[in-house]
Image: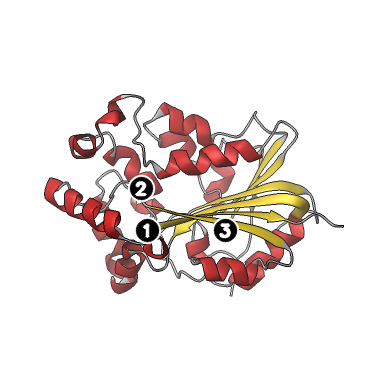
Amino acid sequence: MGILAGERKSAGSWCLGVIGQMANTVGSHFFPEIAAGGFSRVDGTVQFWQRVGALVGQDSIVLDFGAGRGAGQSEDSVAYRRSLRSLKGRVRELVGVDVDPAVTTNKALDRAFVITPDGELPIADHSIDVIVSDFVFEHLQDPARAARELDRVLKPGGWICARTPNRYGYIALANRMIPDQLHARIIQSAQDDRKGEDVFPAVYRLNTAGAFKRHFPASRYDLYVIPWDAEPAYYFGSKLLYSLLLAVQHCTPAPFKTVLTAFMRKRPVP
């Protein structure tokens, strides 16, 4: 089985879907602060990329694992979120890899590589300071292989930053119940700004705190997992459904939040 399955977005991820939704009247009704800058106090993209920004510097070599076509950097309607995502020019080099040839059109990268599902990353050992993987881990058919490759290219002391749907969150649970042939239709119905080319199947094999610990063991990594609930995304334009989903999220304990952000530091060699 390969490192990546499909491209970087899945029916279980809603990063781009939230982009248009947060600007509409339903989101603004529940989060009026969106009027001040375009994002809410629980915006998952802001939370994740702010922390990524704190871990990179001008001398960092960064790998975007599953970089795709760069829709987040170019199509997000909120300028502040675009600026957070855009690392090119802020780091020494931004390298992107993906199984989708569309990665070669990603203007947010300094270099791009198309990889094969069962191939190694075309990157030298211990050459990367920070790896960023935004809504990609849910697509990994062979997480053990992927983890080995990420570990191989990451420098000691470097960071892996990942955002992914929680396998035990209601979004991922619902996604696994929907037949694959209906995913794109349902997603686009729920999120009318979501493009069909950004909907891909998910397998959820590296999407729990336990899976992170298993593939990035404590003997080699310091692991920090942050469960998160962003704004509801799949509400079909209904204010009532939006409010019900907010209530569910409010009552949901941490292990069942919809999203996990993981920050893993590879321990320096003694």
- The correct choice, above or below, for 98 with respect to 143 in the image is above
**Spatial CA span between label 1 and label 3:** 26 Å
Hey, what amino acid is under mark 1? Answer: Thr
Query: Mark 3, residues whose alpha carbon is within 10 Å: few (<14), some, or many (≥20)?
Result: many
Name the residue that disc number 2 marks.
230
- Residue at the image point whose x is 60% and y is 68% from the top: 213
Hey, what amino acid is under mark 2? Answer: Ala
Q: Earlier in the sequence, mark 3 or mark 2?
A: 3
Name the residue that disc number 1 marks.
258
Hey, what amino acid is under mark 3? Answer: Val
Circles 2 and 1: CB atoms closer than 8 Å: yes
Asked which secondary structure carries label 1, the reply is loop
Color scheme of the displayed model: secondary structure
- The correct choice, above or below, for 20 with respect to 265 in the image is above
Q: Report x, y in % for residue 133.
A: 56, 52
- Residue at the image point whose x is 28% and y is 58% from the top: 251
- The correct choice, above or below, for 252 with respect to 69 in the image is below
Name the residue that disc number 3 marks.
99
Which quadrant of the figure has residue 245?
bottom left
Q: Report x, y in % for residue 114.
A: 62, 54
Q: Report x, y in % for residue 124.
A: 80, 54
